Image: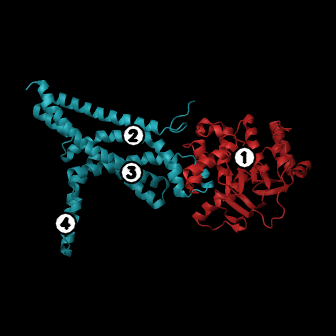
Chain colours: A red, B cyan
Amino acid sequence: MTNQSSVLPFERPKAAQAETRPLMEARNITKYLGGKLILDQVSLSLNKGEFKVLIGPSGSGKSTLLQCLHFLLIPDKGDVLLEGKSAMDMSHKNICAFRQEIGMIFQDFNLFDHLTAKDNVAIALRKVKKWSKDQALSKARDELDKVGLADKAELYPAQLSGGQKQRVSIARAMAMEPKLMLLDEPTSALDPELIGEVLNVVANLAKGGMTMLMVTHQIGFARHLVHEINFMENGRVIESGHPESLLANPASRTAMFCARLSELTGNQ
Amino acid sequence: MNTWEFYSKILIPALNQGLWLSLLIIVPSAGLGIVIGVLAGAGRAAGPNWLKGLLDLYVSIFRGTPLVVQLTMWYYGLPSVSRFLGSLMAPLGLPDFTWKFLVFSPYVASVVAFTLCSGAYQSEYIRGAILSMKKGQFQAAKSLGFTNSQTFWYITAPVAIRRALHGCGNEIIYLIKYSSLALLVTIQELTGKSSALASYYFRPLECYLLTALYYLALVSLATFLLSWLEKKLHVPGLGQAKSL
């Protein structure tokens, strides 16, 4: 097993079953980029408290799907619904309000270079949510404390390690109290020894019942923690299911892909 | 009159007067130039296409023609335009003075010329700084719910200002020196005074050498202020080359 599995000494939380409608739903999303079909009628839903992962070869459309769900890219066709409300055809102001409800974690952190860790967390609270400076900074300190970085609050991004930067970016997203989090390969820009600290934070979010959709290649981490694996290829979700059942079936595309990954990386 | 008296009684008092006039031209031109540069630079980097086209035209005219030509146009050229437009208005019974605002005093002509020329150059530094922003910064801002204008003011501007600081400072240093062109529109600023004295007293070497020292002092002061500002705005990892 990988070293990451040791950070998960708890039961997989149960997702809420009674919800009548999913927290977030993507219906037949189609997206072209540069004239090329990237997403081909992808549908996906997330119930409250569910933790799903997207895996698949590079270029399969995973990141594009996350960005469409967050309206960082506008889908060409299809619909994105948050708590049953469609996000298509919204005004700029409403799209901005929609994005506040969803946290996004990027592969290369995207911290604001000119702000300290605490200001990175506080700025959206102050400028977008219009909190007072004191309120925002005290919330920022709380969130940094939750990711174990209370002592780094005054440092600038250039003074933090990759793992610390990613934890600040998680604190920044969580400070907005999003309804769900989208994580786009949060550990793939990190040195191997820094991956654990970030996965630990993600595991804590899962433990707290956060609804999450994560693109990752950390299969060892995913298989023990998530409710569903979605395998993407050529812009479509071609397999989805419980991690154990997908990975147990050697004929599944997911199992073959993961076997190939572990061959390459020596994991598992 | 001995040499010492020439310096202390004539040259230095005259140059001090000239220095004062030079500052009266340089400071507002530099300030307004920055304002125009920021607006034009932001418009060229992120504005709609029609605005980009308009601002590109402005920059290509004011960067593409000699400043001497621009300055003489503002001062000597515009009155003719004013007269011409006035003559068009006269048959319509409109009062002639409508176009008098196009006749600039030497001072206004210089400040207008230097501001517009400086602004054109400044806009290029600002535009470059904005375009060099990493795409991820905008994505992060969007993902937190920032509107486009919030993103500009709270994310783009603070970084762009730091990135553009060196270039903008450079342009201000140029401005200090090209302010001497104001002598062409009869302003007795630093260079104007000095050239008048040099030909009257036949002492070109002393007059121009001392004038050069005055400019050197002005530029040194500007350099000092800029590096102070640079330190004040310093953020680790921004505005400095990564050590290899």
Label 1 with label 2: CB-CB less than 8 Å:
no
Judging by the rendered image, the residue that carries numbered circle 4 is: B97
Q: Nearer the viewer, residue B241 or A1?
A: A1
What is the distance, in whole Å, between disc 1 and disc 4 at their CAs? 69 Å
Amino acid type assigned to the residue bearing label 2 in the image = Gly
Residue B217 - label: none
Residue B169 - label: 2
Q: Is residue A22 left or right of residue B44?
A: right
Residue A185 - label: 1
Q: Quadrant of residue B223?
A: top left
Tally the numbered discs.
Answer: 4
Judging by the rendered image, the residue that carries numbered circle 3 is: B35
User: Going 30% across and 35% down the picture, which residue do you hit?
Assistant: B218
What is the distance, in whole Å, between disc 3 and disc 4 at their CAs? 31 Å
Q: Is residue B64 visible?
A: no
Label 2 with label 4: CB-CB less than 8 Å:
no
Element type where label 1 sits in the image: loop
Q: Is residue B191 above or below residue A36?
A: above
Q: Is residue A252 visible?
A: yes
Tell me where residue A138 appears, x and y as whole percent: 61, 47
